[in-house]
């Protein structure tokens, strides 16, 4: 019955969600899960790394969530979610086989065609890694189109690191270099300790043929940009993923407005030189 009602309403309302089934749930940390979703109507779902969906938990509400899976997989898609509000809390109570609503994809993603034949530096903090995971998967699937890929990832402690099961697979890729650090190590931790900006001195490739992509807490992005500029990166070589409460996804409601831009429609991916021109500070 719910499927029939949604399909009938969707004919006249493009903002009505499609039904998707939760096929798999992976517990990443105590507060973060990855959900694998598949549309019930076999809808063809294509997206660009960096785009997001509006996810509905029926009876509770809707929230914008970045897509973290490979853009080359049309069978399903994945989102990684931290339990921080009413919608995500309700989502965490669902089980495999339950239904959710999905609108999208929305927004402008990363210009992967412009990134071709360049070195890509990814800098992620905490749950800022999921939006960048789709770039990693994209480059792995098109490894001959890119020079190199380096991931600098910082977490509060080893227990907060997401995608632990993916690191072993990624580490086998000759194209990809992984550097991980934590603020507060456990006795078992043998890796880097400190903020993620401390790792950026290990950037060895030519800056002229490199782009940097940042996603994480606003204060982290602020200091990462300062560090990148000291290392010789130009504003137009730096890309950022902005977070705003994007309610409609189409630029109609205005909740995600920054100056003359709408994050849902003009972003959420912005080049740093574009953000500098906005009337509101970008963090």
Image (cartoon, rainbow, N blue to C red):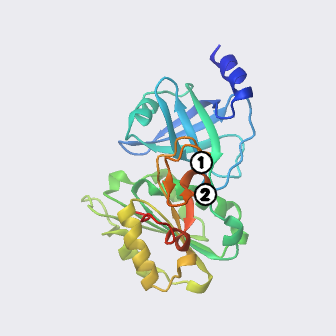
Work out whether mark 1 precedes mark 2 in sequence or the reverse, and give the earlier one.
1
Circle 2 SS class: helix
Q: Which mark identifies residue 251?
A: 1
Seen at 39% across and 62% down, the residue is: 218
Direction left: furthest residue: 187
Local packing at callout 1 (Cα closer than 10 Å; few below 14, some 14-19, many 20+) is some
Q: Position of residue 242 (x, y in %)?
A: 49, 58
Quadrant for the N terminus in the image: top right
Q: Report whether residue 206 is seen.
A: no
Q: CA distance from mark 1 to mark 2?
A: 9 Å
Pick the front one: 45 or 136: 45
Q: Is residue 55 above or below residue 166?
A: above
Q: Which mark identifies residue 266?
A: 2
Quadrant for the C terminus in the image: bottom left
State left or right for residue 212 relative to residue 159. right
- The reply to whether the C-beta atoms of the residues labelled 1 and 2 are less than 8 Å apart is yes
Pick the front one: 224 or 152: 224
Q: Report whether residue 60 is seen.
A: yes
Q: Position of residue 273 (x, y in %)?
A: 54, 74
Q: Position of residue 65 (x, y in %)?
A: 52, 45
Asked where in the image residue 24 lies, by quadrant, the reply is top right
């Amino acid at each position: 019955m719910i499927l029939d009602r949604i399909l009938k309403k969707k004919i006249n309302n493009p903002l009505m969600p499609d039904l998707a089934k939760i096929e798999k749930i992976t517990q990443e940390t105590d507060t973060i899960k990855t959900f694998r979703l598949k549309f019930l109507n076999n809808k063809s779902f294509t997206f660009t790394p960096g785009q997001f969906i509006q996810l509905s938990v029926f009876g509770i509400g809707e929230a914008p969530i970045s897509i973290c899976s490979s853009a080359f997989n049309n069978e399903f898609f994945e989102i990684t979610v931290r339990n921080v509000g009413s919608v995500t809390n309700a989502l965490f109570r669902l089980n495999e086989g339950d239904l959710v609503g999905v609108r999208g994809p929305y927004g402008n993603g990363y210009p992967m065609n412009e990134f071709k034949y360049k070195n890509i530096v990814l800098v992620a903090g905490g749950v800022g890694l999921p939006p960048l995971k789709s770039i990693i998967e994209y480059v792995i699937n098109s490894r001959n189109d890119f020079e190199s890929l380096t991931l600098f990832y910082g977490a509060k402690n080893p227990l907060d690191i997401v995608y632990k099961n993916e690191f072993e697979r990624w580490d086998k890729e000759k194209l990809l270099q992984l550097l991980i650090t934590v603020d507060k190590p456990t006795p078992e931790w043998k890796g880097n300790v400190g903020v993620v900006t401390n790792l950026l001195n290990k950037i060895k490739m030519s800056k002229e043929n490199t782009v940097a992509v940042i996603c994480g807490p606003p204060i982290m992005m602020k200091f990462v940009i300062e560090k990148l500029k000291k290392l010789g990166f130009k504003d137009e070589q730096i890309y950022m993923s902005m977070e705003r409460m994007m309610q409609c996804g189409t630029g109609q409601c205005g909740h995600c407005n920054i100056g003359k831009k709408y994050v849902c429609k003009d972003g959420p991916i912005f080049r740093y030189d574009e953000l500098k021109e906005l009337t509101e500070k970008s963090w």
